[in-house]
Image: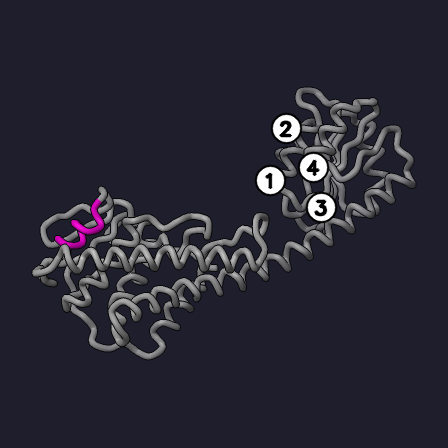
Amino acid sequence: MSELNTTQAPPAILFVDDEATAVKYFQRAIGQLAPVVTGGSVEEGKAMLDAHGASLAVLVSDQRMPGEYGNELLRYAREHYPHIVRILTTAYSELDQTVEAVNQGQIHRYIKKPWDITALRMELKQALELSGLRRERDQLVREKLSVMQKQTVAARIGMVQALTVSLIGPGRFQPVETYLAGADLAGARSPEPDWNRMDYADLVGAESQRSGAFGHAVSARLAELRTRLAGRNAAEATAVLAEVVGDGTLRRDGDAATWTTPALLSEFIEKPVDEAVSPAHASWLAALLWLEEAGGALQLVREGEAITARAGTRNESFANDRLAVWIEKFSETV
């Protein structure tokens, strides 16, 4: 197995074949096109992929080798390093395995041995060009994804603010502040749209539907709490919180309530669009809105792996750019 010199600039070609003669022949024929690294078995090929996957552009694998067939290596590369262009080569007429490799999307080309050197060089040159195009495409997708993630974060945070205003009136930012502080303490990260399953229009539609369902759940829960908790006050903040969220997600200890599953605090902000928000998470925001109406607030702190809530002091006013500050903070995690 030959190692890749990390001082060499990519792209590089990985050739895997158990025949030493074939390895030397391939290196002489293709070495001028790009750096060539080699392996003598499927296991060695996997090790090279794991060590140098980011620097590899093309994988050429023989089919018949000791142990596993080359198909297995090509499948592994497709699953773990999809940017690498995959080529199968063999001296045998193994039609079934070749058809399987093509049908499963494991290979870009099938090249039969013995090689026609001119044709082999042309195939590898085209494979290197294809790899370059894939890298450019992936970069564009990453940039598009980053923009979309930031837009999604901003839309979701804006939704929390809009929902608060619609349910308890304008100028009541404390519940939003506490809610976003909780998501931050829980380590919320921006959601990643699944571009393999939906385009932009579908994504916007799915986000709208998810936000609407969340808003409806919070609204219904708040209406229930206003009736159910009539006569209770902000002094009972942590007791009410533990009672309302419940479902084993909170542990009450004296004047504190501790989340046994902190990830619940970040569900709406960070979960993928196809994952619904839990009733417990909707109850969390509804509890904050009820507490604001009752004249109270919560202070959240992270204590090791847990997040603890205690009664806190309400802020009567917030800076005009406070929502923008939160949007910027969560966008930094993209």
Q: Tag 1: Cα neighbours inside 10 Å, few (<14), some, or many (≥20)?
A: few
**Membership of 239 in magenta stretch:** yes
Disc nearer the start of the sequence (4/3): 3
Q: Which amino acid is tagged 1?
A: His
The numbered dot on residue 80 is 1
Stretch of the chain drawn in magenta: 238-246
Disc nearer the start of the sequence (2/3): 2
Disc nearer the start of the sequence (3/1): 3
Disc nearer the start of the sequence (1/2): 2
Would you name the residue on which mark 2 appears? 43
Q: CA distance from mark 4 to mark 3?
A: 17 Å
Is residue 198 positioned above or below 44 on the image? below
Where does residue 14 sit, x and y in percent of width and height? 72, 39
- Indicate the secondary structure of the residue bearing disc 2: helix
Would you name the residue on which mark 4 appears? 105
Is residue 182 positioned above or below 113 on the image? below
Q: Tag 4: Cα neighbours inside 10 Å, few (<14), some, or many (≥20)?
A: few
Disc nearer the start of the sequence (2/4): 2
Nearer the observer: mark 1 or 2; the answer is 1
Residues 245 and 34: in front is 245
Q: CA distance from mark 1 to mark 2?
A: 14 Å
Residues 272 and 182: in front is 272
Where does residue 213 sit, x and y in percent of width and height? 37, 55
